[in-house]
């Protein structure tokens, strides 16, 4: 429960920080530069020159939809960074000698108490990691049932449950990856609607308003799709890391503990 509370607090703080940082960047850098480029193009056109549609990085990302997409991107990356750090900490436990069993040794149900002691003496945070939990569950089940099959099933169930939990905890990131292109499409609808509202100006020869509105429509979708691709890439990398953690944990249990267990009936 404490772990979930800490993660929820981190997500809320990360969202607030992302909003503040992105909005500050837009107010101080992005929009002033974009307005300067757009105004220069308008001045050239007003002076009788040919109107050139402004194409600049600042102009492409200047609208509110793109700002919202960048906020969501930073928020998603922060969440995934938090989960990546946790997964890396758990992966490092695979290199620790949590149990030490000499080759050729056979572990009977009465011997499990000695193996459980080092696991129970770990710090509380490390005890909540997958590897100590899977080992403790398997050894405790073997101690109670004296069944190697039951111990194996207990370790497997612990890993399967952890895999399901990790997958469900990515639901917020999946929502963000869905929301980003959706916000981009909202910008498209807004831009096209604004362009249609200025069609009479285009018919009179003033195409500046229509092109600016169409720029909003296409730029928002363009930026949103690019950001979505970036977030999806890192999300799949995180999923791969978590899946490897679960598989390596079960392999650790099998090679370091389960194969040494010996039932009294065998």
Image (spheres, rainbow, N blue to C red):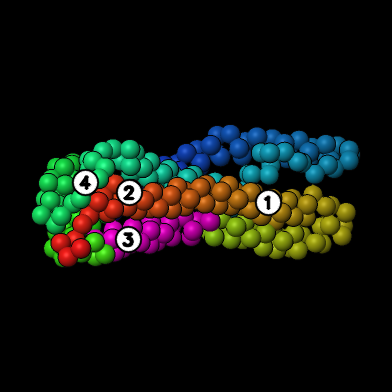
Q: The C terminus appears in which quarter of the rendering?
A: bottom left
Q: Which x, y percent locates residue 214?
A: 74, 55
Calculate the distance from the C-alpha at mark 2 to the C-alpha at mark 4: 13 Å
- Say which element carries label 4: loop
Mark 2 or mark 3: which is in front? Answer: 2
Disc on res. 156: 3
Q: Is residue 170 magenta?
A: yes
Left or right of residue 121: residue 235: right
Calculate the distance from the C-alpha at mark 3 to the C-alpha at mark 1: 44 Å
Which residue carries the number 2 mark? 255
The earlier-in-sequence mark between 2 and 3 is 3
Mark 3 or mark 4: which is in front? Answer: 4
Which residue carries the number 1 mark? 222
The earlier-in-sequence mark between 1 and 2 is 1
Q: Quadrant of residue 158?
A: bottom left
The magenta-colored residue range is 151-177
Q: Is residue 138 visible?
A: yes
At x 78% / y 52%, what residue is drawn? Answer: 211
Calculate the distance from the C-alpha at mark 1 to the C-alpha at mark 2: 50 Å
């Amino acid at each position: 429960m404490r772990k979930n509370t800490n993660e929820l607090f981190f997500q809320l703080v990360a969202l607030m920080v992302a909003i503040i940082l992105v909005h500050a960047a837009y107010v101080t850098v992005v929009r002033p530069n974009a307005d300067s480029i757009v105004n220069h193009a308008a001045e050239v056109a007003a002076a009788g020159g040919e109107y050139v549609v402004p194409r600049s990085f600042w102009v492409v990302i200047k609208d509110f939809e793109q700002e919202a997409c960048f906020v969501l991107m930073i928020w998603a990356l922060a969440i995934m960074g938090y989960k990546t750090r946790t997964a890396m900490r758990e992966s490092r436990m695979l290199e620790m000698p949590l149990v030490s069993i000499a080759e050729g040794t056979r572990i009977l149900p009465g011997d499990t108490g000695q193996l459980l002691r080092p696991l129970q003496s770990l710090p509380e945070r490390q005890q909540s990691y997958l590897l100590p939990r899977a080992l403790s569950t398997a050894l405790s089940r073997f101690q109670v049932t004296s069944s190697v099959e039951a111990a194996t099933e207990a370790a497997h169930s612990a890993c399967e449950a952890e895999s399901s939990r990790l997958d469900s905890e990515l639901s917020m990131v999946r929502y963000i990856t869905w929301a980003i292109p959706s916000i981009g499409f909202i910008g498209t609808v807004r831009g096209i609607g604004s362009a249609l509202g200025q069609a009479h100006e285009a018919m009179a020869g003033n195409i500046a308003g229509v092109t600016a509105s169409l720029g909003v429509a296409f730029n928002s979708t363009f930026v949103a799709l690019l950001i979505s691709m970036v977030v999806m890439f890192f999300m799949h990398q995180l999923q791969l890391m978590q899946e490897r953690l679960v598989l390596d944990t079960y392999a650790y249990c099998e090679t370091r503990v389960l194969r040494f267990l010996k039932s009294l009936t065998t």
